[in-house]
Image: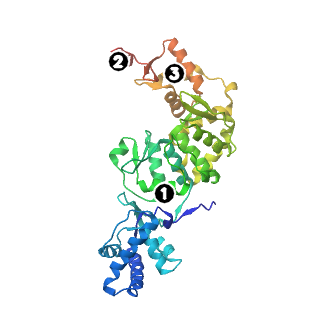
Amino acid sequence: MINYAMLHFWELPPDTYVKINVEVVREFILKVLEIFDKRVNKGRRDKALVDWLFERSENHKVWKKKYDRRQIHYWRNGNFIPLWVIIELSKLLNNKNILKKIERHVIAFKSRSGRTIHSFKNRQQFPLRITPEFVSLYFHLIGDGYVGGKKSTASYFQKNHGAREQFLQKLKNCFGDFTISSKSYENCVVEFPFIIARIIKKYLRNNGFYSADSKLPKIIYNLDRLSKVAGLAAIIVDEGNIDDTIMIGMYNYDLIVQLRELIISLGYKCGKVSERKTVWNFSISNKSLNLFKNDLNNLSKSFPTCDLSFKRINFDILYEIHQRGTDNTVYNWDIIEKQICDLLQNKELTCPEIRVLLKLEFNTAISHIALLRFLRKMRRNEKIKHNLNGNTLEWYKDSAIFLAHQT
């Protein structure tokens, strides 16, 4: 079993706000106040403490605020308290174990004006574990994520409901429970607490999440194998395409080169990086499918959210075709023609959609290029028709659909 690295709560950004069990935080602050009792008159200790904190705030590059004495009472009652305040107060007690004790009793955290992230139901919230799920979140964010802006927002765009749900579950598995905007979620966007993106950035020491100028942080190359595979799976979900091979493409040349190097470090074979319509891409050789499938299966046993999501079916089709050998396969085209006609009853489908449905409904695995050629043959024989919808070619069979396009 892998002993994953831990991220303690005192390693979070200093302007994080944490909520601690009321009895623990009350005992902690009372011990600090006892120290100030010896420095000033008892009636002035609260003011002396907030003045002392005001001076110490410069050490943490946080929003400098002049607290009043009522703030001490507010914190003692178990309300949110800035992390940097806890760190500074702990230094006064000269007790190395005090932060570890407090960590066991953290029940929530957030940024100053952000959404609250509550503790896990079955285990303590901190320290956070740097698992493959944690790592995959970084790759999702450089893929289809958005972090930044004047409102300090963080979000992830994904049209597929299953992949969107997996991303949300990864967030909650790694950091805790929080609420989301149901309206945004229905519009394919997962909005999540900004502090999560800041924690990922701080731990990985990356330069940001904007895919146009992102670079893989050095720490990624030193991670365990399953964490690297989780990152690969995440980038394929967002930026990959699986037809007759696995292709990954992005606009950032430096990033795509780094991704290729990372994948090669896993022992996979990759094609050269090439440019197509301003997008840099490379393929993962079908010779590496066995190794990739084995890695995915090992990863999914412990972290089921880190698989290929809705693209797993495409991978399984590709793997099956590769295993049996396309050169030695003779398709029963009469049966496949009937299956295609059944699928196109009262609907329009793209070639990739037909390919997936053939596998799901008839257990027929066929290569993309072979299917596309057969669809064109069926069209020449006037068995089906097609319609160009934007840049997408959609196939259909019924006369009702044909008449609709004529109008």
Q: Give the quadrant of the N terminus.
A: bottom right
User: Looking at the picture, which amino acid does disc 1 mark?
Assistant: Ile
Image quadrant holding the C terminus, namely top left
The amino acid sitting under disc 3 is: Lys
Q: In this image, 264 relative to 98: left or right? A: right
Residue, disc 1:
199
Distance, label 1 to label 3, CA atoms, is: 54 Å
Mark 3 or mark 1, which is nearer the start of the sequence? Answer: 1
Left or right: residue 85 versus residue 8 is: left
Q: Which residue is mark 2?
A: 404
Residue 126 seen from this side: no
Residue at 44% across, 50% down = 168
Residue 264 percent across, percent down from the top left: 67, 42
Query: Front-most of 403 and 242?
Result: 242
Q: Which residue is mark 3?
A: 338
First-in-chain label (3 vs 2): 3
**Measuring 60% from the left and 22% from the top, which residue is drawn there?**
332
What amino acid does circle 2 point to? Ala
Circle on res. 59: none
Tell me which residue sits at (69%, 38%) in the image. 269
Residue 65 in the image, given as x and y percentages of width and height: 35, 66
Q: Please determine whether, in this image, residue 90 is positioned above or below residue 357.
A: below
Q: Is residue 379 visible?
A: yes
Residue 323, percent across and down?
67, 34
